[in-house]
Image (cartoon, grey):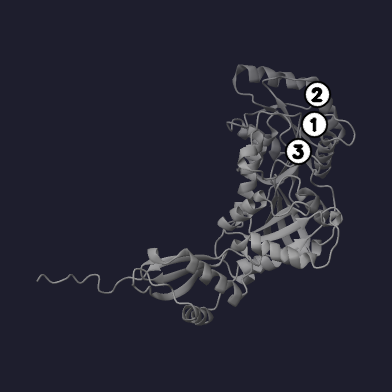
Amino acid sequence: MSFTIAIIGRPNVGKSTLFNRLVGQKLALVDDEPGVTRDRREGQAKLYDLDFTIIDTAGLDEGAKGSLTARMQEQTETAIELADALMFVIDARVGLTPTDRAFADFARKANKPVVLVANKAEGKHGELGAMESYALGLGDPVQISAEHGEGMGDLHEALSALVPATSEEDDEAEDDEDISEEEAAQRPIRVAIVGRPNAGKSTLINHLLGEERLLTSPEAGTTRDSIAVEITWQGRQFRVFDTAGLRRRSRIEEKLEKLSVADALRAVRFAEVVVMMMDAQNKFEEQDLRIADLVEREGRAIVLAVNKWDLVERKPNQISQLRTDADHWLPQVKGAPIVAVSGLMGEGIDRLMIAIQQAYAVWNRRLPTAALNRWFEQAIQASPPPAVSGRRLKLNYITQVKARPPSFVLFCSRADAIPRSYLRYLTNSLRETFDLPGTPIRITLREKANPFAHKRKRPS
């Protein structure tokens, strides 16, 4: 079990900046506005030869019972319970505040090792504030600047006394490299849950986890960071990313929301399967269609989830009507699995998890060359490419160059003259013949080399 450290402190002292520094990526949103972090976020940290799990938490703050602020503090308290040690962070430029003193007592009561970190300690003002922190009684402060990477050696020295030595392990590749179907079946499936604000994304993930791991609220925009959680379902591993709701660009005004949207888009690019959640009472709205188009352009497998199904009046043939509507509004991912769910009640969760695995398997599929060639000949015979300017277009052969998603190269003459409508015909025919529902299909045109191009025309 990895040694776990929780970063705690009042809002806006630089906890998320320190988290990003330690994990080596900008995973947590950072902004000058207090309270940006709401859910707790875990990451694998590395500081020189030390490897450990780090938890970024919401700023310790007081709020009325049941309020969003109070539930943010509950998330922080849970992180403290899970941690083996704490990093208590203060803002050295501001110096000690009454809130710092109150929560230093809170940290002591946790009865766990505490490393006092004076962040933003660069310059004369920062050094004075760091000296003040001795009054907290938590030992010598480690003076750092998380933003500029200063003081990391001192932090390493302080943590070395706590973090046990670990053997180095190779990091698993997290890209779209082509892998075998057997290997794909063993890897954790990376899943991003996306959709408009308040579609119920966090509620669904909480039900999968069986705990209130992510904050939920009737207020749109509760989730800001893309939070990754590990889920095991019927023996299969999943890494699921909850994301901020995606609104139309014209309605995104605040800087923080722009950062949240950018974070959600990064989660889509990192994912292998994207679950697009829609509100059952307002499905297939313009923004839903834009999100689905984004997922298709990024080449990710897609599953459509119609959430809050428990609020819909039941009528005959509702599911088949959903299938018809999906194929009408989203022809670019025709046949994508669509599942009616209720994240709150747990309805349809098993069907959703099965659909994710099926979409992932299709996304990783490689087609047999012989079968692909037979299909290609039959498709051309059934509907030959149109002549352009009286000249026939010649399609020579097609080959699959990669999976994730299924991608093909079509060798032909006059690639620029082949109509997009004919490529759509070939794409739809591929879907139907080889059972590739929903997944993006890439067909790249390439002109076959002219064997006589090197022979110059003789002068007359």
The Cα–Cα distance between marks 1 and 3, rounded to whole angstroms, is: 10 Å
The Cα–Cα distance between marks 3 and 2, rounded to whole angstroms, is: 18 Å
Q: Amino acid at mark 1?
A: Leu
For mark 1, does the 10 Å Cα neighbourhood hold few (<14), some (14 to 19), or many (20 or more) residues?
Answer: many
Q: Amino acid at mark 3?
A: Arg
Is residue 170 visible to the viewer in this orientation of the structure? Answer: no
Q: Are marks 2 and 1 in contact (CB under 8 Å)?
A: yes
For mark 2, does the 10 Å Cα neighbourhood hold few (<14), some (14 to 19), or many (20 or more) residues?
Answer: some
Q: Amino acid at mark 2?
A: Thr
Residue picked out by circle 2: 99
Is residue 380 visible to the viewer in this orientation of the structure? Answer: yes
Coordinates of residue 397 in the picture (x, y in percent):
43, 76
Above or below residue 255? Residue 278 is below
Q: Dividing the image into 4 quarters, which one contains the C terminus?
A: bottom left
Mark toward the start of the polypeptide (1 vs 3): 3
Q: Residue furthest right?
A: 65
Residue situated in front as seen by the camera: 244 or 136: 244
Above or below residue 94? Residue 55 is below
| Element marked by disc 2 | helix
Tally of marks: 3
User: Is residue 66 found left or right of 159 in the rendered image?
Assistant: right
Q: Could you say which disc has been placed on residue 24 in the image? A: none
Q: Are marks 1 and 3 in contact (CB under 8 Å)?
A: no
| Element marked by disc 3 | loop
Coordinates of residue 227 in the picture (x, y in percent):
71, 46
Q: Are marks 3 and 2 in contact (CB under 8 Å)?
A: no
Residue picked out by circle 3: 38
Mark toward the start of the polypeptide (3 vs 2): 3
Above or below residue 417? Residue 121 is above
Residue picked out by circle 1: 60
| Element marked by disc 1 | loop
